[in-house]
Amino acid sequence: MAEWIISPLSKAHERAGFSCGKAPLDLFLLAHVSQYEKRRLARTYVATEAGSTIVAGYYTLATGSLDASVLPQPLRKKLPNYPIPTIHLGRLAVDTNCRGRRLGETLLLHALKLAHESSERIGIFGVDVWAIDDEAAAFYRKYGFIALEDDPQHLLLSLKTFNRALDA
Ligand SMILES: CC(C)(COP(=O)(O)OP(=O)(O)OC[C@H]1O[C@@H](n2cnc3c(N)ncnc32)[C@H](O)[C@@H]1OP(=O)(O)O)[C@@H](O)C(=O)NCCC(=O)NCCS
């Protein structure tokens, strides 16, 4: 089984050949990520195999917020009617050559742990994501994300749910 190394994107990482089969996610890594990093619009974490600098997968995080009205009723209970703070998982993609080796899961859990650690210092209710299509939404639902009421492809995992899974 591959040993994945996940680290913040740096100049040493080779991005040029990355292809996950979803053009906007490839284009982001090839053409736009440097501007996002420079302006701190997102932070990008990449996975490489031990001894390699070739990007096998990546994800991005930024802060986000949700209108409380998009939360399903059970989650909305006891929450104020103000914007709810989140960490926004902007993108997550695995190169087609590395599929099915649990790299998607490894990247997602890395992102959730980072959100969990950040929530020790700043208010974060959960991690939200806009899935690129139905297939991607199915991937997130597998890990406990639930669809929000504004769009079935807008999903959320509350940190309370994630913490419960960590403790189990
Ligand atoms: C979705 C994606 C990240 C999954 O990565 P991966 O490394 O192939 O997946 P993993 O090997 O980590 O799979 C972990 C589990 O998720 C399941 N899974 C993978 N892709 C899935 C999908 N699209 N729908 C439902 N389940 C999925 C696997 O079958 C596996 O399940 P198991 O625990 O029962 O064995 C990858 O297919 C990808 O990059 N797709 C294109 C980009 C994309 O859609 N990104 C997500 C949204 S922005």
Image (cartoon, rainbow, N blue to C red):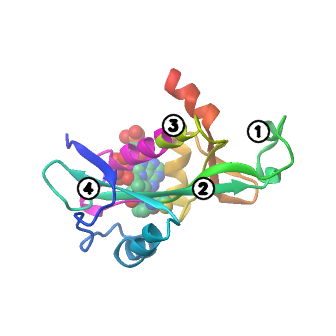
Q: Are marks 4 and 2 in contact (CB under 8 Å)?
A: no
The crowding category of the residue bearing disc 4, from other C-alpha atoms within 10 Å (few below 14, some 14 to 19, many at least 20), is: some
* Kind of residue at disc 1: Leu
| Crowd tier of the residue under label 1, counting other residues whose Cα lies within 10 Å: few below 14, some 14–19, many 20 or above | few
Residues in magenta, as a range: 92-113
Q: Residue at x 50, y 65 (%)?
A: 40
Q: Which residue is label 3 attached to?
A: 117
Q: Which residue is mark 2?
A: 63
Q: Is residue 73 left or right of residue 129?
A: right
Residue underneath mark 1: 75
Nearer the camera: disc 4 or disc 1: 1
Q: Residue at x 76, y 38 (%)?
A: 75
Q: To which residue does mark 4 refer?
A: 98
Which of the two residues, 32 or 91, is positioned nearer the viewer here? 32
Q: First in sequence: mark 2 or mark 1? A: 2
Is 105 on the left or on the right of 64, as rendered? left
Does residue 104 belong to the magenta stretch? Answer: yes
Residue 81 visible in the shown view: yes
Q: Is mark 4 within 8 Å of ligand 1?
A: yes
- Furthest-right residue in view? 81
Distance between mark 1 and mark 3 Cα atoms: 22 Å
